[in-house]
C-alpha cells in the first residue's frame, strides 16, 4: 500500500508541465497565417474602440456595448494566440502548470463575460425597437456601465472556482493536451482520479454561461420579431431587422460552437471536432467581428471618414448594426 502511494506520488510529481499538441504541421505557414490573423484582430477591434471613443455621434448605448465587446475580444485573443505563435516558431509546445492554469482562467473569465455581454446587447436592441420612447431613460450610461461590469463580475468568481476544481486534481501519466490552449475538457481527460463531480461542475457552469444568456437573447429576439412583423412598411421592417442582423450572426456562431464543445457528450471522435470548433469562437469570431458590425454600418463608416479627416455630414439613421 505504501509502495503504491509512493509510486502514485512519483507519477503525480512528474507532471510539472503540459504539452499543447495543437497544430504542428507546416509550422512556418501556420505561423504566418495566425500572425496575420492576430494583427488583423488587434487592428480591426482597436479601430472600433478608437472610433467609437473619439466620435461623439457614437456615444450611445449600442456603441458603448460594441466598444466593450471589441476591447474584450482583443484581450480574449491575446490569451491564446501569442502562446500558439511562440510554439510554432520555437517548436517547443510545453506550458508550465501555472501558465496553463492562468491561460485557462483568463480564457474562461473573458469568455464567460462575453456570454453575458452579448445578452446585454440583445436587451439593448429589444429596448430600442420595442420600447423606443423609454429607451434612453432605461438605458442610461450608469445602466450600460453596470451591465458591462456585471458581465465580468458574474464570470470572475465562478471561473476562479472552476480553476480551483480542475487544478486540484492529480495529473499523472500522459501530459499531452490535444488542443492549442488549456481548457477544461481536455485537461479533465488527463486526470488520474474520479472526475464525475468535475464534469457535473463543468456542465453546470456551461448552463449558466451558455444556456441562460442564450435563452435571454432568444426571448429578446422573439419580442423584436413580433415588433418587426407588426410594422406596416416593408422598408421599415427591413431597416429595423438590419439593426439586429450583425449581433444575431455573432450570437449564432459564438453560442453554436461553444455549446457543441462544452455541452455535447464526450467521445473519442469529438476531440478533433472540438479543437476545430474552438478555432471558431476563439479566433474566427474576433477576426470577423469588426467586419460583421461595420461592413454595412453607415454611422461607423462615416465616423471612420471623419476620423481620417475627410469631413462629411454625419448620416443620421437608426444607427445600426446591419
Image: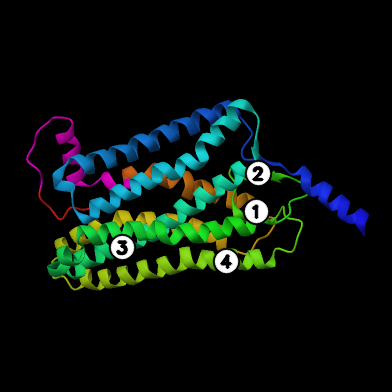
Earlier residue among tags 4 and 3: 3
Q: Secondary structure at mark 1?
A: helix
Q: Which residue is mark 3?
A: 122
Earlier residue among tags 3 and 2: 2
> Gap between marks 1 and 3, in whole Å?
35 Å
Residue 105 image point, x, y percent: 53, 50
Q: Would you say the residues marked 3 and 2 are in contact, meaning their CB atoms lie under 8 Å apart?
A: no
Q: Is residue 313 above or below residue 197?
A: above
Q: Which residue is mark 4?
A: 203
Viewer can see residue 126: yes
> Gap between marks 4 and 2, in whole Å?
24 Å
Viewer can see residue 321: no
> Gap between marks 3 and 2, in whole Å?
38 Å
Q: Which mark is residue 167?
A: 1
- Residue range in magenta is 292-315
Earlier residue among tags 1 and 4: 1
Q: Which residue is mark 2?
A: 97
Q: What residue is drawn where x is 48% and y is 47%?
A: 282
Amino acid at each position: 500500500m505504501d509502495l503504491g502511494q509512493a509510486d502514485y506520488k512519483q507519477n503525480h510529481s512528474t507532471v510539472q508541465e503540459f504539452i499543447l499538441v495543437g497544430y504542428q504541421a507546416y509550422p512556418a505557414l501556420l505561423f504566418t497565417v495566425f500572425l496575420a490573423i492576430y494583427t488583423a484582430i488587434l487592428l480591426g477591434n482597436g479601430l472600433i474602440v478608437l472610433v467609437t471613443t473619439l466620435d461623439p455621434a457614437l456615444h450611445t448605448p449600442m456603441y458603448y456595448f460594441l466598444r466593450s465587446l471589441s476591447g474584450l475580444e482583443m484581450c480574449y485573443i491575446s490569451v491564446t494566440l501569442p502562446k500558439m505563435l511562440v510554439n510554432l516558431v520555437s517548436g517547443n509546445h510545453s506550458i508550465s502548470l501555472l501558465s496553463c492554469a492562468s491561460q485557462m482562467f483568463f480564457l474562461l473569465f473573458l469568455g464567460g463575460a462575453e456570454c453575458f455581454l452579448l445578452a446585454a446587447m440583445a436587451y439593448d436592441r429589444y429596448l430600442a425597437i420595442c420600447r423606443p420612447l423609454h429607451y434612453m431613460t432605461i438605458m442610461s450610461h450608469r445602466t450600460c456601465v453596470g451591465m458591462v461590469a456585471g458581465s465580468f463580475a458574474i464570470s470572475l468568481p465562478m471561473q476562479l472556482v472552476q480553476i480551483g476544481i480542475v487544478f486540484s486534481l492529480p495529473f499523472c501519466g500522459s501530459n499531452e493536451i490535444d488542443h492549442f490552449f488549456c481548457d477544461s475538457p481536455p485537461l479533465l481527460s488527463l486526470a488520474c482520479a474520479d472526475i464525475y463531480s468535475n464534469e457535473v461542475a463543468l456542465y453546470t457552469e456551461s448552463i449558466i454561461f451558455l444556456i441562460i444568456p442564450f435563452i435571454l437573447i432568444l426571448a429578446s429576439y422573439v419580442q423584436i420579431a413580433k415588433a418587426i412583423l407588426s410594422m406596416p412598411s416593408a422598408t421599415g421592417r427591413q431597416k429595423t431587422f438590419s439593426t439586429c442582423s450583425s449581433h444575431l450572426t455573432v450570437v449564432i456562431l459564438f453560442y453554436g460552437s461553444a455549446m457543441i464543445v462544452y455541452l455535447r457528450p464526450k467521445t473519442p471522435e469529438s476531440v478533433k471536432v472540438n479543437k476545430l470548433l474552438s478555432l471558431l469562437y476563439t479566433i474566427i469570431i474576433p477576426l470577423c467581428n469588426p467586419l460583421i458590425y461595420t461592413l454595412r454600418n453607415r454611422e461607423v463608416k462615416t465616423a471612420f471618414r471623419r476620423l481620417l479627416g475627410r469631413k462629411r455630414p454625419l448620416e443620421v439613421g437608426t444607427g445600426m448594426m446591419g
